[in-house]
Amino acid sequence: MPDSAKKNLLDETKCYETFKGIVSDTDKMGLKLILSFDEFGTITSSDKFDPDFFSFFRSIANNHECAYITTSRLKLQKLCRSSNVSESPFFNIFTPVPLGQFDKSEAISLIFKPSEEAGIKFFDEDAEFILNLSGYHPLFIQMACASLFDYKVHNNGSSAKVNFNEVKSNFLVEANEQFEQIWHDEDETERQVLSIIATGSEIDSHEQYVVRELQRKGYLTEEQIKLFSEAFLEFVLSKNPERNIPKQTGKQERSRSSFRNLIGKFFKRS
């Protein structure tokens, strides 16, 4: 074995032993170690992490007071670069917890509370604008709120008349990167279903399982089968310029009007 390979092996063994020592020390102190892995796909898709790496962490979790929290858009096995990794027993120790969208009260709280605490007031029309852009998706709510907040800060605060087109343009600079990632992560069948729904066409019965999966991910709403936000709808339509976009039906127009009325009533301040 070359000297460089021996050194790498020794370094790797030393890292594993050092980590085991840390976990053992936390056990003795009566503590539980919790490791958080954000965007876990960057690990599972890398050839630098082999099955032995995952087996080691499974052993740690089974024999010590240690737990792991991972986040990803896709299921863990789908993130893996090879079948050897995806079939590792490591992944059997996890319990999936789909996050999905916020409910109405959570979305409203996220819109109003942080801005008020920072001294910038949002109004009813601001909230309606934000929800049209973001739906109840927490990431996009924050992004839309940040764009509106920055606009108000640079335009005389809460009293400024908002140029919503400018705010939307600023929001889309960052949001479109996320939309592109969502589009890339979905398989061809899921992209087709998103496109069908975006154009207002009917979903075949055999595609209902795809609809449920997209709802689980938060890309379709639960109450009605539609894309979670107006901005994401526009993005999906831009991916399908060859499709004919149907005119809005009377039912869709009434639904939009009812939504505006609901927002107005909900955000009514005494």
Image (tube, rainbow, N blue to C red):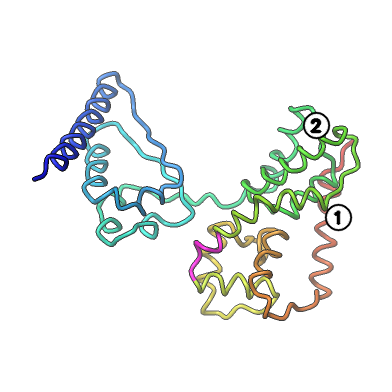
Please state if 150 lies on the left or on the right of 26 as rendered.
right
Is 43 contained in the magenta span? no
Which class describes the residues within 10 Å of circle 2: few (<14), some (14-19), or many (20+)? Answer: some
The quadrant of the rendering that contains the C terminus is top right
> In this picture, is 57 found above or below 232?
above
| Foreground residue among 267 and 247 | 247
Mark 1 and mark 2 residues within 8 Å of each other at the beta carbon: no
Q: Which residue is identified by label 2? A: 120
Is 184 contained in the magenta span? yes
> In this picture, is 185 found above or below 248?
above
| Foreground residue among 21 and 184 | 184
Q: Secondary structure at mark 2?
A: loop
Q: Furthest residue to the front?
A: 3
Q: Position of residue 156 (x, y in %)?
A: 88, 33
Mark 1–mark 2 Cα distance, whole angstroms, equals: 25 Å
State the mark number for residue 75.
none
The quadrant of the rendering that contains the N terminus is top left
Q: Which residue is identified by label 1? A: 261
Please state if 240 lies on the left or on the right of 48 as rendered.
right
Q: Amino acid at mark 2?
A: Ile
Could you tell me which residue is drawn at 56 percent across and 63 percent down?
Answer: 183
Q: How many marks?
A: 2
| Quarter occupied by residue 33 | top left
Q: Furthest residue to the top?
A: 29
Please state if 202 lies on the left or on the right of 17 as rendered.
right
Q: Position of residue 242 (x, y in %)?
A: 67, 80
Provide the residue span drawn in magenta.
182-187
Mark 1 or 2, which is nearer the eye?
2
Q: Amino acid at mark 1?
A: Asn
Q: Position of residue 245 (x, y in %)?
A: 74, 77
> In this picture, is 110 found above or below 188?
above
Could you tell me which residue is drawn at 29 percent across and 48 percent down?
Answer: 48
